[in-house]
Amino acid sequence: MLHTLEWEYTPDYELLGVSSAVGCHRLAWSMNRAFGWRLSCDQDVVMGQGKKEDTLHPSMRHVDEEAGIACTLILNRLPGGMLAKGAAGLDFLVMVNHHELAAHEVIATLRELPEVAFVTALDPEECGAMEPLTVFD
């Protein structure tokens, strides 16, 4: 008899999509100033692109276990493909797990940054980013 194991994964982070005309390092620098974080280079996120070559999406991460903060900035759009296909118009994804700031407070602060043109909350499953982002669990 064949059994199927079903597992429902609930992410412990809020996923935000950001549009910006600046690069990763400039946006990370601005976010570090605004939030007091120390985003620094972390692992690349590998995303399969079907028949095309897999894409490597660079990330920058800040973790402060004592304060209960884990924030990750990931490049969403590359010439070879998207990380979150349901958020193709957004340049970056931001994973926020913050025990002191609510997602709407993070969004409000990001909207004030001159480097940010647009920011919105995303559903990780609907936009197709949940599986590749499990590398940060």
Image (cartoon, helix red, strand yellow):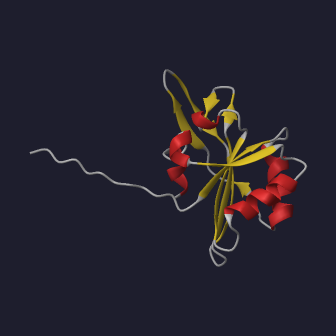
Residue 18 to residue 9: above or below: above
Q: How many callouts does the rendering have?
A: 0
- Left or right: 18 in relation to 50: right
Give the residue at x 53% y 62%: 12
Residue 54 place in picture, x, y as percent: 55, 30
Which residue is farthest left? 1
Q: Nearer the viewer, residue 104 or 52?
A: 104
- Left or right: 28 in relation to 136: right
Residue 68 place in picture, x, y as percent: 63, 73
Residue 63 to residue 6: above or below: below
Which residue is farthest bottom? 66
Give the residue at x 57% y 48%: 123
Quadrant holding the N terminus: top left
Give the residue at x 86% y 62%: 33
Which residue is farthest top? 51
Question: In which quadrant of the rendered view does residue 8 lie?
Answer: bottom left
Give the residue at x 83% y 53%: 111
Residue 30 place in picture, x, y as percent: 86, 55
Residue 32 to residue 55: above or below: below
Q: Nearer the viewer, residue 14 or 80?
A: 14
Question: In which quadrant of the rendered view does residue 13 lie?
Answer: bottom right
- Left or right: 36 in relation to 101: right
